[in-house]
């Protein structure tokens, strides 16, 4: 008997996969980062080709030109990613750094505006300053920043994998207690 929601076995396998990914990301962050960049490149190529196929099937009066442009741009980005994976990784890292700085500035502005309405707005200010510091640190050392993102993914994989394994054990217990009840119902019918 399996769980009415999900199988304990499939949840356990998902947990094991997350743990393997987590360990690999922590032990070989450069390889995982390169793998993620190449996966992005492969996605862009496949998406671009499928978009062009879709454009070829689309009737011209419905705006096929935008689909063609999108498909060509996707394919070019995919090819650039494979030709220069380091540049792609660097661009992604800079994007994360810019996001952190912009978010930090936004948090500082928000704290200034909310100081009349909330207490302890300094916590929001600290959050904003931390975001800005993170962005500046990543801009200063982008490779270290990219590796840090990979390490965070690895830590996430370990924690998520452990949680899934715990869930699978609980589902397995539920399946084992539900099994005798199900057999009794079948015999009674």
Image (cartoon, grey):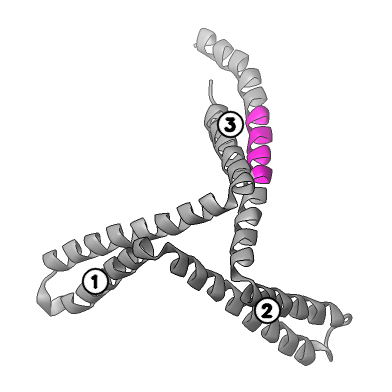
Q: Which residue matches tag 2?
A: 136
Residue drawn at (41%, 56%) of the image: 38
Residue 14 place in picture, x, y as percent: 55, 37
Residue 30 place in picture, x, y as percent: 55, 54
Q: Is residue 82 left or right of residue 159?
A: left
Q: Residues within 10 Å of mark 1 (few under 14, many from 20)?
A: some
Residue drawn at (29%, 70%) of the image: 76
Residue drawn at (26%, 64%) of the image: 48
Residue drawn at (51%, 70%) of the image: 90
Residue projecting furthest to the right: 119
Tag 2's secondary structure? helix
Q: Which residue matches tag 3?
A: 12
Q: Nearer the viewer, mark 3 or mark 1?
A: 1
Name the image quarter holding residue 184: top right
Closer to the chain start, of discs 2 and 1, is 1
Closer to the chain start, of discs 3 and 1, is 3
Residue projecting furthest to the top: 187
Q: Residues within 10 Å of mark 3 (few under 14, many from 20)?
A: many
Distance of mark 3 from mark 1, alpha carbons?
A: 41 Å
Q: Nearer the viewer, mark 3 or mark 2?
A: 2
Residue 107 place in picture, x, y as percent: 72, 82
First to last magenta residue range: 158-170
**Decide: marks 2, 1 in contact (CB < 8 A)?**
no
Distance of mark 3 from mark 2, alpha carbons?
A: 40 Å
Residue 85 place in picture, x, y as percent: 42, 63
**Decide: marks 3, 2 in contact (CB < 8 A)?**
no
Q: Which mark is residue 72?
A: 1
Tag 3's secondary structure? helix
Closer to the chain start, of discs 3 and 2, is 3
Distance of mark 2 from mark 1, alpha carbons?
A: 34 Å
């Amino acid at each position: 008997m399996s769980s009415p929601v999900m199988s304990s076995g499939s949840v356990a396998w998902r947990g094991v996969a997350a743990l393997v990914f987590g360990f690999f990301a922590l032990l070989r962050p450069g390889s995982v980062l390169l793998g993620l960049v190449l996966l992005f490149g492969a996605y862009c190529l496949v998406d671009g080709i499928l978009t062009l196929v879709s454009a070829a099937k689309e009737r011209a009066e419905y705006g096929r030109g935008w689909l063609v442009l999108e498909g060509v741009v996707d394919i070019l980005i995919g090819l650039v990613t494979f030709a220069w994976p380091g540049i792609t990784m660097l661009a992604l890292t800079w994007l994360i750094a810019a996001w952190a700085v912009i978010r930090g500035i936004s948090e500082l502005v928000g704290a200034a505006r909310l100081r009349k309405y909330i207490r302890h707005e300094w916590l929001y200010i600290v959050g904003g300053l931390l975001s800005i510091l993170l962005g500046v640190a990543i801009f200063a050392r982008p490779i270290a920043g990219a590796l840090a993102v990979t390490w965070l993914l690895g830590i996430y994989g370990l924690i998520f994998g452990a949680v899934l394994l715990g869930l699978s054990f609980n589902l397995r217990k539920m399946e084992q207690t539900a099994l005798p009840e199900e057999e009794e119902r079948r015999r009674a019918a």
